[in-house]
Amino acid sequence: EGVLPQEYTLIKMEVLQPFPPKLGPLERKNVYLAAATLRPETMYAQTNAWVLPDGKYGAFEINETDVFILTERAALNLAYQNHSRIPQKPSCLLELTGRDLIGLRLHSPLALNQVIYTLPMLTILTDKGTGIVTCVPSDSPDDYMALQDLKAKPALRAKFGVEDDWVVPIEVVPVVDIPGFGDKAAEKVCLDLKIKSQNDKEKLAEAKRLTYLKGFTEGTMTVGEFAGRKVQDVKQLIKNKLIEMGGAIAYSE
Ligand code: A2H
């Protein structure tokens, strides 16, 4: 943890009806998986959501109508940032595990894919962000490798009850072009470094080092309303747009 707070964008990934039995008590609410991201400009290229199968989550009342699924830790932070139905206090309607969330169908703001699925990622930390991550395999090496693992390993899918149709058709969606890396920078770096799995921590750290800053300083948008413009010039505009359209809120920790 640094000295300065980290400013995230919380993406409201809407859970689509019909809800599974486990989410029955939430049937009349607007329910969202709330994913913390530092890269709001990449949201066009979301392919799925990630949850930690053994992670503990809850469904928390954010206001009179909206419910966010996230960790209790994040709900407490949100309560202190004026995002809880009860001021300063998380209001949990339902306790859940990551396993309960796998297979949920979602609609996420700006995503070119109209319906995406909730899938398991084994490297999610429960003490960072919300414990929910939105997957952008074009630009995040962690996301790219977690998706590769599910695609390449039928036994991994079976272990978590992941249906083939939720994973096999997923394609990497380009969103940012980086000189020397192309428009699927995470895929390129993972292949170049011969990264074997989502657990290959050291190589993934190197992959992030190679792409992250460059994506910000030299990247150009290839899709959406800001196509052709530099990432550095539109990152904040896209964050504002997400917030104004009701698809996101600002969150810091
Ligand atoms: B980023 P930092 Cl395209 N556990 O969003 C593991 N990873 C988490 C997390 C958690 N609990 N909460 C958030 N994250 C991820 C997009 C993205 C991200 C792209 C490229 C790089 C990237 C799409 N996933 O992050 O430690 C989220 O993934 C590179 C670090 O606070 C979030 O932004 O710096 C980022 O890690 C926050 O990591």
Image (cartoon, grey):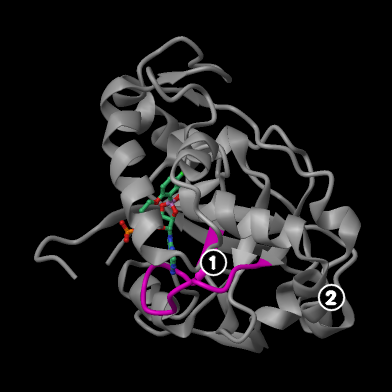
User: Magenta residues, as a range?
Assistant: 120-133
Q: Earlier in the sequence, mark 2 or mark 1?
A: 1
Ligand 1 under 8 Å from disc 1 Cβ? yes
Quarter location, residue 63:
bottom right
Instruction: Say which residue appears at 83% left-offset and 50% top-offset.
Output: 168
Badge 2 amino acid = Ala
Q: Is residue 121 magenta?
A: yes
Quadrant occupied by the C terminus: bottom left
Front disc: 2 or 1: 2
Badge 1 amino acid = Ile
- Residue count near mark 1 (Cα–Cα under 10 Å), binned few <14, some 14–19, many ≥20: many
Q: Is residue 6 above or below residue 121?
A: above
Q: Is residue 105 magenta?
A: no
- Toward the top, the furthest residue is 228
Instruction: Say which residue appears at 82% left-offset and 67% top-offset.
Output: 154
- Residue count near mark 2 (Cα–Cα under 10 Å), binned few <14, some 14–19, many ≥20: few
Q: Quadrant of ligand 1?
A: bottom left
Across and down, in percent, residue 185 comes to 47, 32
Ligand 1 under 8 Å from disc 2 Cβ? no
Quarter location, residue 136:
top right
The secondary structure type at the circle numbered 1 is strand
Which disc, if any, is residue 158?
A: 2
Q: Mark yes or no: residue 27 visible.
A: no
Alpha-carbon span between mark 2 and mark 1: 21 Å
Which disc, if any, is residue 132?
A: 1
Across and down, in percent, residue 224 comes to 58, 20
Across and down, in percent, residue 189 comes to 45, 39
Across and down, in percent, residue 24 comes to 84, 81
